Image (cartoon, grey):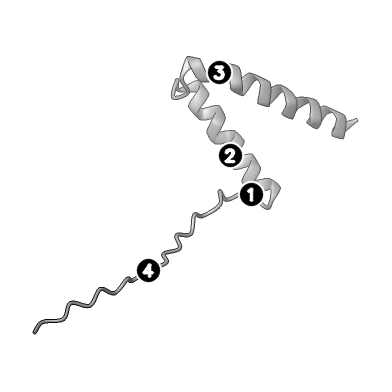
Amino acid sequence: MEVVKTQRVVEQVQVGVPAADRPRASAAYAAILLELSLRLDTGRIYERDLASLTSALTTLIDAFNRRCR
């Protein structure tokens, strides 16, 4: 006589999703801004994305100007 035994196996898998790296030093922010400038000058930023950049850059410049007063 054959006996069939059913066994349920549960495996838990955790996947880590890395958080976006954020610069810790002002020099790193400067490098990012220079890279953005280059991309804008060379047309590597789509026209459709300029509106979102305009808002973010305006906020950045306003904050910079407040800090420099």
Using the rendered view, name the quadrant where residue 1 is placed: bottom left
Q: The residue tagged with tag 1: helix, strand or loop?
A: loop
The residue that disc 2 covers is 32
Give the Cα separation between the discs numbered 2 and 3: 17 Å
Using the rendered view, name the quadrant where residue 13 is placed: bottom left
Question: Tag on residue 14?
Answer: none
Q: N-terminal of the two: label 2 or label 3?
A: 2
- Rendering coords of residue 28 (x, y %): 62, 47
Q: N-terminal of the two: label 4 or label 1?
A: 4
Q: Are marks 2 and 1 in contact (CB under 8 Å)?
A: yes
* Side (left or right) of 26 relative to 52: right
Residue at left offset 91%, top offset 30%? 69
Question: Label 1: how many residues lie within 10 Å, few (<14), some (14-19) or many (20+)?
Answer: few
The amino acid on which the numbered mark 1 sits, given as a three-letter code, is: Pro
Residue at left offset 63%, top offset 49%? 23
The residue that disc 4 covers is 10
The amino acid on which the numbered mark 3 sits, given as a three-letter code, is: Leu
Give the Cα separation between the discs numbered 2 and 1: 9 Å
User: Where 19 falls versus 50 (above or below)?
Assistant: below
2 or 1: mark nearer the eye: 1
Nearer-the-camera pick, 23 or 51: 51
The residue that disc 3 covers is 50
Question: Label 3: how many residues lie within 10 Å, few (<14), some (14-19) or many (20+)?
Answer: few
Nearer-the-camera pick, 22 or 69: 22
The residue that disc 1 covers is 23
